Amino acid sequence: MPEKGCLPNEFSFGILVRGYCRFGLANKGLELLDEMRSSGIFPNRVVYNTLISSFYKEADMQAAASNVLPTLSLLIWG
């Protein structure tokens, strides 16, 4: 996106995460979550809900519990 002059934000990242998750690629969505954070963009609840839902559908709650939920809890409870 930056190569085309478009700066990413939480909404554009969210759309990409949702796309990956819809095709069963929650781990790629998780990589985008890391990219968001390293870019200084804070994911919103939609991104987290999308990832958790996708891991649930893939029957991989271990991945959700170890990768998504700890970060989400830090944002909620500081």
Image (spheres, grey):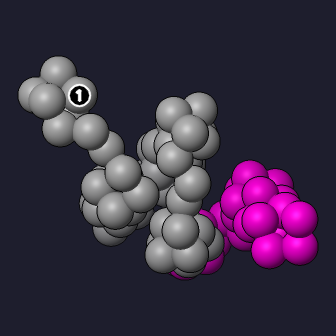
* Residue sitting nearer the eye, 43 or 55: 43
Q: Residue furthest left?
A: 4
Residue at x-position 89% and y-position 65%: 78
Residue 41 shown left or right of residue 5 in the figure = right
Disc count in the image? 1
Give the vertical position of 32 relative to 73 (above or below).
Answer: above
Residue 58 shows in the view: no
Residue 54 shown left or right of residue 19 in the figure = right
For label 1, count other residues whose C-alpha is less than 10 Å away and answer few (under 14), some (14-19) or many (20+).
Answer: few
Name the element at disc 1: helix
Which quadrant of the figure contains the N terminus?
top left
* Residue sitting nearer the eye, 48 or 66: 48
Does the magenta segment cover residue 76? yes
How far from the left and from the top, in percent, is residue 15? Answer: 29, 62
- Span of residues in magenta: 53-78
Residue at numbered disc 1:
2
Give the vertical position of 44 relative to 4 (above or below).
Answer: below
